[in-house]
Amino acid sequence: MTYDVIVVGAGLAGLTAALRLSEQDRRVLVIAKGNGATHLAPPVIDVLGYAGDKRIESPQKALSGFVVSHPGHPYANVSADVIAESLDWLSRRVPELGYQGRLDENWLLPTAVGVPKPSALVPESMVAGDLRRGGRFVFIGLRGLKDFHASYLADNLARAQLPARVSTRFIELEPPHDRNADPGSVGFARRFDEPRFRDWIVQALAGQLEPNEKVGFPAVLGIEKAGEVWRDLERRLEHPAFEVPLLPPSAPGIRLYDALARALRQAGARILIGDRVAAGGSEGGRVAEINALTAARPVAYRANSFVLATGGFASGGLELDSRGSVRETVFGLPVAGMPDAGEPMFSPRYFDTHAVSRAGVAVDARLRPVDEKGKVVFENLHAAGAILSGAVPWREHSGNGISLATGYAVAAAILEHAAPRIRVDARD
Ligand SMILES: Cc1cc2nc3c(=O)[nH]c(=O)nc-3n(C[C@H](O)[C@H](O)[C@H](O)COP(=O)(O)OP(=O)(O)OC[C@H]3O[C@@H](n4cnc5c(N)ncnc54)[C@H](O)[C@@H]3O)c2cc1C
């Protein structure tokens, strides 16, 4: 079977492009060797949180200046209007997450280490954590849950530089031991799906909450029944409740993946997870097919257009060898954004800006990979997300924003230049 579009990669960029195309009746195949950063990262969409050391209050206002000073950045190829549209589109497409927010202001959320984090679009289960207007916050620790220490979070947040006064404290709970439960965040999220476990939490907190306090839980408030869990807790505790994003894995990130994958299947797309993709044949400057390297034998898939959404170093879209060369792993595309001669690839401290993190694929205005001279490599190949060169997402707080906006824009670029599909009604 020939597809209209094959998307390589099932992270936020690939799923966004695929869903947009499927909604327009394109036959779409998504193929990926594994899950993307959705399973590790919170589902908050950071568009632009920092420019240098300056915290951004309105990405909308900051973007035009940011793009001028960062001409090779992925945002240079998508207008602020398209970024704003992509945020609205995601909110509508996954109503189960109840996304809230717009491009013109960043929320300010507490993280598990008590550092305030700016983000443009956040699920409803995180909204009450907004620190911009200050207030009283109590954080709930769950003994046995890895990597979440409510006392540490409360203490750090009390010292953070915030636009308004906050008071913080913590309560540590010791949930009943369950020998069969996974002690990680996904295991705890499954326990929250069970009404009996929530009954225990509500009883344990009875009489312990103070007036006007907002109650912060680690982001484990359910997997399959997430909205229901969060609403149930708010109602029974009679206090605003919110989730605090955690270290990987990410239960709310998995909810986003599940919602997008469900929408994709409903729109008729096919999703194959578990197959590594390698380049197949090309004809006349166009990609003709890709090869899926399954356990049994390579399988070739053909399409009219292809989207490369394989992520950066973390997901294997890029590889760095011991001699310092960076390789794009599917098509062997030219890699741009490499450090200048003599510039060190890495900085001494983990959270510093590492020059090599700007490496990736450079693209034209239609998000098609280009070579060193700016020439399009394949007429029908587009790229989106963390595979693109020019960003330092960890420092900028722009990772999911780039993937959402470029995934959305890639679909538009493909639709603009493809013949319209005629929908055939079964009754005709
Ligand atoms: C721990 C963590 C926390 C983060 N926190 C935030 C945050 O708070 N806010 C924010 O905005 N961003 C955050 N980010 C960044 C953000 O999540 C990513 O930048 C973004 O999701 C990348 O999406 P993507 O679709 O471009 O790539 P990925 O999500 O990396 O997906 C790449 C996909 O390509 C597939 N793939 C790769 N190579 C091949 C191949 N050869 N064949 C087949 N498939 C292949 C992978 O299996 C995967 O499905 C975080 C990231 C991590 C890891």
Image: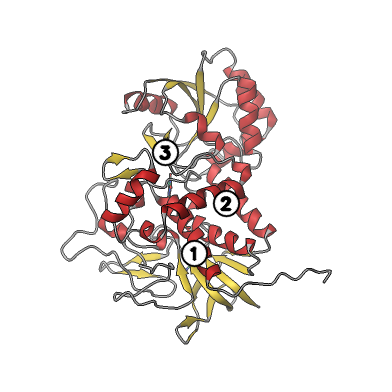
> Between tags 1 and 2, which lies in front?
1
Which picture quadrant has residue 222?
top right
Q: Which residue is the extreme one toward the bottom?
A: 284
- For badge 2, the amino acid type reads Tyr
x and y, in percent, of residue 54 in the image: 28, 40
Query: Is label 2 within 8 A of ligand 1 (CB to nearest ligand atom)?
Result: no
Circle 1 residue: 410
Considering only vertical position in the picture, is 165 above or below 18?
Answer: above
> Which label belongs to residue 157?
none
Considering only vertical position in the picture, is 44 above or below 36?
Answer: above
Instruction: Determine the secondary structure under disc 3.
Output: loop
Which picture quadrant has residue 268?
bottom right
Circle 2 residue: 257
Circle 3 residue: 106
Closer to the N terminus: mark 2 or mark 3? Answer: 3
Is 127 positioned to the left or the right of 65 in the image? right
Front residue (pair 203, 369): 369
